Image (tube, rainbow, N blue to C red):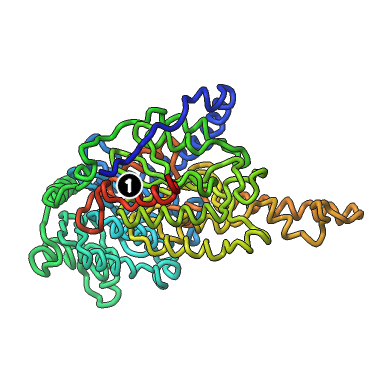
Amino acid sequence: MAIVPLAPIGSPRDQVCDERTFREYRETLAEREAVLAERRAKVHQGWGPKYLARLHERGKLSARERLAMLIDPGTEAFEVGTFVNWGLSFGERGLESPGAGVVTAFAQVEGRWCMVIANDNTVASGSWWPKTPEKIERAQTMALRLRIPTVYLVDCSGLFLPEQSRSFPGATGAGHIFKMNALLSAHGVPQVAGVFGDCIAGGGYMPIISDRVYMTEQAYMVIAGAALIKGAKSQKITSLDIGGPEVHVHQSGCADVRVPNDEVAIECIRRELAKLPSSGADFHRHGRGSVEPFHQARELAGLIPPDHREVYDATEVLARLCDQSLFWELMPETGEEMITGVGRIGGLYAGFIINRQGLVGDPERRDRKRPAAILYRGGIAKISAFSRACNADGIPIIWLQDISGFDVGAEAEAQGLLGYGSSLIYTNSTNEVPMFTVLLRKASGAGYYAMSGLPYDPIVQLSTTISRLSVMEGRTLAIATYNTKLDDDFEIVTSDPDERAEIEAGMSAVAARIEADMDPFVAGRQMDTDEIVRLDELRPWLAALVEMAYQNTGSRRIKNPRIWSLHDLAVISSGPR
């Protein structure tokens, strides 16, 4: 029998970091995470208490109230796309669309992980803004990749028409939501919809392909609402008359069940989901439960320096994510700049790939050290082989990025880094195993791509409040921009004081703009990352995602640990014995 040789890793916090440094890191991070909490709260309010009160006066619940009622008691929802459209305003009145007017979240319902998509009916009656369709489609894609049930809580008055040109056309325009509905259905992913209010045009189409559709007495689904019908056909008729439950449950058959109110609809959806097969995660735990790390996960906030130029021990990060702080490192002698291996999280096996920081040995010159957080030939080959083996064994992969990019220069080109990088790109592009990416700090250049950044389709990409996503740093780009004005030591060559001041101001402006663009909230706004999380939230997030990867049985190969390809890889890489 091949035993998974998990071994203790990590050290007590006081042996890793002195008290003063630990406190300074935590205080700096706490300031950033306070901003995160404040901005989350603002998004969660939608358009504010006045609009929530209007819903309650009509006997309706908000999107987040419906979500809270839907999920299992004692569990939490994991929202994605919280900061889509953050800081942007639309239309002549400069209206905001918190979270793009839709809540998308992983949630447990009757013990099964689901993707919940709920229109925020406090924001322009759940309208679709620029980026709303893309956010919904991203959530549908996550559900499709994981094969988890999808729940639509629909209360949508259609497109926000003043900005229709930015949400209606194009490959990811609103109509693509319905294609995703169809693809989920074609792949056997259960879809259940509750229709709670205005569902006009696209809002009416979204629930139709679902396997079950519940409508409340206040709900209607119409291609065109009463106002448009009155203008087009001079007919005075209400939207409920056109497409309410009397029509769609009893006449058209476009809905299945008529219920009196929101609360009953939610309870019906819960009962419907309870009929589905339960999770396969416990089967794949092989009798193991979730065990907290021996070294506490909350210590991450004081061990990872907020300044990306400072180093830390990547092993200590793994020790605070993996169950019992146990880990099986594979190929430790190859590509020292990378750590690859297997650990349990939530009782389930996952592959981990993380960038080492500081200085590492150079296999070409034993007397020389070179900076880590850079991909060299050995590291690229190592993570490519490990990624392929995890794919062969059905083990989900967690990529923990803190990378400056690829090695560059004559030696790197002579060693064929372009070719090795292409092999890694091919591996990550064709893997079928679920992959999840975390941007711990810096995610720079082609290194971001190589380590399964969002363009390489991880199911979820998370950022922290100290992550920095860019091609290069602001100072570096400023030097490149003004290269002709600088000497070999990057000093300004002119002796003219006015010209010198102009160059200095220009370089500062370039650096400041790039630094601002690297803000994780900018990435969240643009959907360049899926969610921003606190460091102490990383383990619960990853445990939830890994459990989702094991939930649906029969949708992909999951080999038992006795016959992993990883065992073969370990023997081969260790050399003769």
In the image, farthest residue toward the front:
577
Disc 1 marks a residue whose amino acid type is Leu
Quadrant where the image shows the N terminus: top left
* Above or below 438: residue 414: below
Image coords of residue 71 (percent x, y): 23, 43
Image coords of residue 384 (percent x, y): 45, 57
In the image, farthest residue toward the left:
250
In the picture provided, is 440 more to the left or to the right than 175? Answer: right
Q: Mark 1 highlights which residue?
A: 545
Image coords of residue 225 (percent x, y): 26, 67
Task: Count every numbered label the image shows and give the total.
Answer: 1
Within 10 Å of the Cα at label 1, are there few (<14), some (14-19), or many (20+) other Cα atoms? many
Quadrant where the image shows the C terminus: top left
* Above or below 225: residue 322: above
Residue 261 visible, this angle: no
In the image, farthest residue toward the right:
495
* Above or below 563: residue 91: below
Query: In the depicted view, which residue is nearer to us: 345 or 519?
Result: 345
Residue at screen point 57% across, 41% down: 357
Residue at screen point 15% across, 55% down: 217
Residue 172 visible, this angle: yes
Splitting the image into 4 quarters, where does residue 76 fall? top left
Query: In the depicted view, which residue is nearer to us: 152 or 316?
Result: 316
Query: In the depicted view, which residue is nearer to us: 387 or 437?
Result: 387
Residue at screen point 77% across, 60% down: 483
Q: Secondary structure at mark 1?
A: helix
In the picture provided, is 208 more to the left or to the right than 390? Answer: left
